[in-house]
């Protein structure tokens, strides 16, 4: 069970489930802050846009990104990505009028805006605890993600929960027994904004995860983004090495198969790709002609609240004789970095990288 300390949080947003679904132009954006010594009285960043005549539904919350190469970037986050179109015009007008702001007691100049139009995202957040996390943390992380969506819109959280193929995966990496990097991948552009909006209540706050008191860092790290169109343009590889980072298994008829057989791996990825990719990029059914030319695998048990799940971890090399199949498999392998492979990817199983 997951709980959090009460904080001042944005109100729950009513994202109507009856509105026609349109893919937003932007997944999000960030402003770039450059330190300045200009002698002036700055406006706090959280109040800076309030100098504009703004509507309640496009009044952002500000979430810092992890510093990279000393650059400070802050995301103005809205509950619905479709609001960014109108927000962009307002943002540029305000920058033209005044670009000096205060952020965490330091004076900055807004030197630029980065726009994110990608559909696929990988996010990580550091979580520190007062005692070691239990091995059954998977269910708690899964529930935490859905609580963040519900913070923004209970209707959206329910829609996601009811989908047969979830548009997200979760995972974690142990930095130490008392610190993990919580990892989330999103497969739809429109999900980044509501996830971050709902997550804001816990950033930098004390909370409980899997029954353990802990504290989230006050920033997020968007480690990787791309689009279906960019992945589809990647050059084909006749040999693909996949490293399975967490226990991976597959449903095979009525049984569970821990060995990553080519048909199970690539048919599963093709099915997920066709669910989330644009219509023009979908693939027909493939009768795979592929061999496993090498592997180093071990089986491990991932402990869940309902019992252990057995899966394989390690390296597998797939070799393709047909050039068109190699092209499709290359695309699907890069998609797998976000989508995961096999069963229970929303609970940390099937995490993968290209070796």
Image (spheres, rainbow, N blue to C red):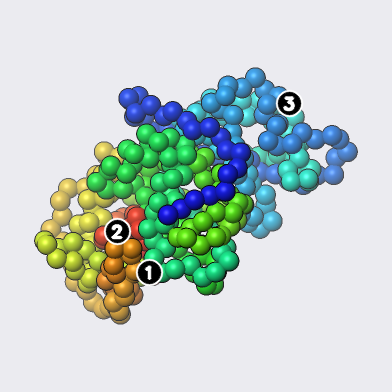
Residue drawn at (32%, 44%), measured in percent from left and top? 161
Q: Earlier in the sequence, mark 3 or mark 1?
A: 3
Q: Identify the residue position indicated by label 2 in the image.
A: 344
For the C terminus, the quadrant is bottom left
Residue that carries the numbered disc 1 in the rendered image: 245
Q: Which badge, 1 or 2, is on the more N-terminal residue? A: 1
Q: Residue at 57% of width from left, 63% of height from top?
A: 128
Q: Is residue 101 visible?
A: yes
Observer-side mark, 3 or 1, equals: 1
Q: Is residue 122 above or below residue 95?
A: below
Residue 353: x, y in percent? 38, 65
165 to the left or right of 107: left
Q: Which residue is mark 3?
A: 97
Q: Is residue 349 visible?
A: no
Q: CA distance from mark 3 to mark 1?
A: 49 Å
x, y percent for residue 157: 38, 40
The one of 290 and 244 positioned closer to us in this rendering: 244
Depth order, front residue of 333/320: 333
Find the residue positioned furthest to the top.
Answer: 53
The crowding category of the residue bearing disc 3, from other C-alpha atoms within 10 Å (few below 14, some 14 to 19, many at least 20), is few
In the foreground, 149 or 227: 149
Quick one: SS at disc 2?
loop
Q: Are marks 3 and 1 in contact (CB under 8 Å)?
A: no
Q: CA distance from mark 1 to mark 2?
A: 14 Å
Image side of residue 129 versus residue 341, left or right = right
Q: What secondary structure is marked by label 1?
A: strand
Q: Quarter-wise, where is residue 250 in the image? A: bottom left
Residues at marks 2 and 3, CA–CA distance in whole angstroms: 50 Å
**In contact (CB < 8 Å): disc 1 and disc 2:** no
- List x then y, in percent, for residue 209: 48, 58
In front: mark 2 or mark 3?
Answer: 2
Say which quadrant the N terminus sits in: bottom left
């Amino acid at each position: 069970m997951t709980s959090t300390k009460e904080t001042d949080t944005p109100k729950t947003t009513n994202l109507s489930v009856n509105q026609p679904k349109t893919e937003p132009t932007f997944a999000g954006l960030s402003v770039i802050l450059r330190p300045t010594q200009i002698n002036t009285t700055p406006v706090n960043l959280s109040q800076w846009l309030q100098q504009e005549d703004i509507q309640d539904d496009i009044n952002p919350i500000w979430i810092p990104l992890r510093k990279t190469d000393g650059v400070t970037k802050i995301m103005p986050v809205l509950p619905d990505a479709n609001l960014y179109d109108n927000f962009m015009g307002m943002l540029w007008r305000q920058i033209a009028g005044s670009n000096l702001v205060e952020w965490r007691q330091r004076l900055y100049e807004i030197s630029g805006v980065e726009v994110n139009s990608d559909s696929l995202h990988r996010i990580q957040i550091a979580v520190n605890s007062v005692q070691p996390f239990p091995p059954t943390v998977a269910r708690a992380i899964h529930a935490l993600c859905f609580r963040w969506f519900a913070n923004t819109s209970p209707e959206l959280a329910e829609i996601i929960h009811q989908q047969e193929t979830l548009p997200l995966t979760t995972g974690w990496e142990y930095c130490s027994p008392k610190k993990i990097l919580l990892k989330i991948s999103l497969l739809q552009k429109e999900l980044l904004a509501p996830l971050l909006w709902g997550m804001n209540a816990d950033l930098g706050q004390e909370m409980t995860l899997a029954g353990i008191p802990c504290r989230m860092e006050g920033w997020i790290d968007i480690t990787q983004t791309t689009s279906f169109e960019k992945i589809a343009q990647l050059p084909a590889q006749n040999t693909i090495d996949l490293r399975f980072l967490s226990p991976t298994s597959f449903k095979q008829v009525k049984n569970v198969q821990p060995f990553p057989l080519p048909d199970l791996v690539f048919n599963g990825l093709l099915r997920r790709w066709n669910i989330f990719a644009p219509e023009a990029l979908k693939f027909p059914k493939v009768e795979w002609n592929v061999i496993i030319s090498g592997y180093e695998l071990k089986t491990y048990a991932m402990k869940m609240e309902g019992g252990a799940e057995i899966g394989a971890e390690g390296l597998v090399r797939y070799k393709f004789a047909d050039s068109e199949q190699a092209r499709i498999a290359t695309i699907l392998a890069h998609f797998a970095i976000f989508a995961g492979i096999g069963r229970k990817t929303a609970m940390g199983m099937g995490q993968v990288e290209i070796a």
